[in-house]
Image: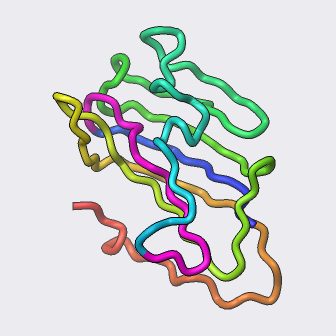
C-alpha cells in the first residue's frame, strides 16, 4: 500500500510551475497510468496556485496534505523559490500487488496559455507499507545517471 509523498521543489524559471500531473502506474501499467491527477497543486491540496491570500503563497498543514514551507527570494512566481509539500494517502489508499511507479511532471505556463516544460530541482520521498520477504530493491543511481542536461 502506498502511504504518501513528500516533495521539496526548487523552481528554476519565472512563472507558474505547478501544472504537472502526478501519475500512479500500478501493477504493470505501461503507457497509461491507473491514476492521473489534474496538477501538482491539486495533488497537494492547494488549488489556484497556492495563492491565498492574493499575491502570496499560503502555507497550510492538515492531517493529510500541506504546503509547509516556501522560501521566496524576491516575490511570487519567481525563479529560485523553494517549496516543501506532503500528501498522505490514509483516507484514499493506493493499493498495489506487484509494482508501483509514481511520476510527477515538471510543467509550468509560458505566454499565451501554453505549457512550459521545466528543469526544476525536485527531491522526493515515497512512503509505502512493505511485506516480507521481498525481492531486492532497484539499484542505486550514480551521479551521472541523475544529471539533468
Left or right of 106 on screen, residue 86: right
Tell how many labels: 0
- In the image, is residue 96 above or below residue 58? below
Say which residue appears at 23% left-offset and 31% top-offset.
113
Estimate the x, y position of residue 17 in percent, counting from the top left: 36, 36
Estimate the x, y position of residue 97 in percent, counting from the top left: 71, 79
Say which residue appears at 45% left-offset and 54% top-offset.
104
Image quarter of residue 13: top left
Which image quarter holds the C terminus?
Answer: bottom left
- Nearer the observer, 111 or 60: 111
Estimate the x, y position of residue 131 in percent, counting from the top left: 81, 79
Left or right of 104 on screen, residue 62: right
Which image quarter holds the N terminus?
Answer: bottom right
* Residue at far left of view: 112
Say which residue appears at 39% left-offset and 31% top-offset.
81
Left or right of 112 on screen, residue 141: right
**Which secondary structure type mostly characterizes the magenta part of the structure?**
loop
Left or right of 93 on screen, residue 81: left
Question: What segment carries the magenta color?
Answer: 13-30
Estimate the x, y position of residue 44 in percent, counting from the top left: 59, 39
- Nearer the observer, 86 or 49: 49
- In the image, is residue 135 above or below residue 146? below
Amino acid at each position: 500500500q502506498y502511504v504518501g509523498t513528500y516533495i521539496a521543489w526548487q523552481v528554476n524559471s519565472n512563472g507558474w510551475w505547478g501544472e504537472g500531473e502526478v501519475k500512479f502506474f500500478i501493477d504493470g501499467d505501461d503507457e497509461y497510468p491507473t491514476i492521473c491527477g489534474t496538477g501538482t497543486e491539486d495533488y497537494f491540496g492547494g488549488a489556484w496556485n497556492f495563492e491565498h491570500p492574493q499575491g502570496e503563497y499560503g502555507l497550510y498543514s492538515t492531517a493529510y496534505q500541506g504546503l509547509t514551507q516556501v522560501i521566496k527570494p524576491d516575490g511570487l512566481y519567481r525563479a529560485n523559490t523553494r517549496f516543501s509539500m506532503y500528501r498522505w494517502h490514509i483516507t484514499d489508499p493506493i493499493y498495489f500487488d506487484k509494482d508501483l511507479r509514481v511520476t510527477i511532471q515538471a510543467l509550468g505556463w509560458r505566454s499565451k496559455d501554453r505549457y512550459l516544460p521545466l528543469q526544476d530541482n525536485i527531491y522526493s520521498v515515497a512512503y509505502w507499507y512493505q511485506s516480507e520477504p521481498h525481492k531486492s530493491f532497484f539499484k542505486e543511481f550514480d551521479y551521472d545517471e541523475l544529471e539533468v542536461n
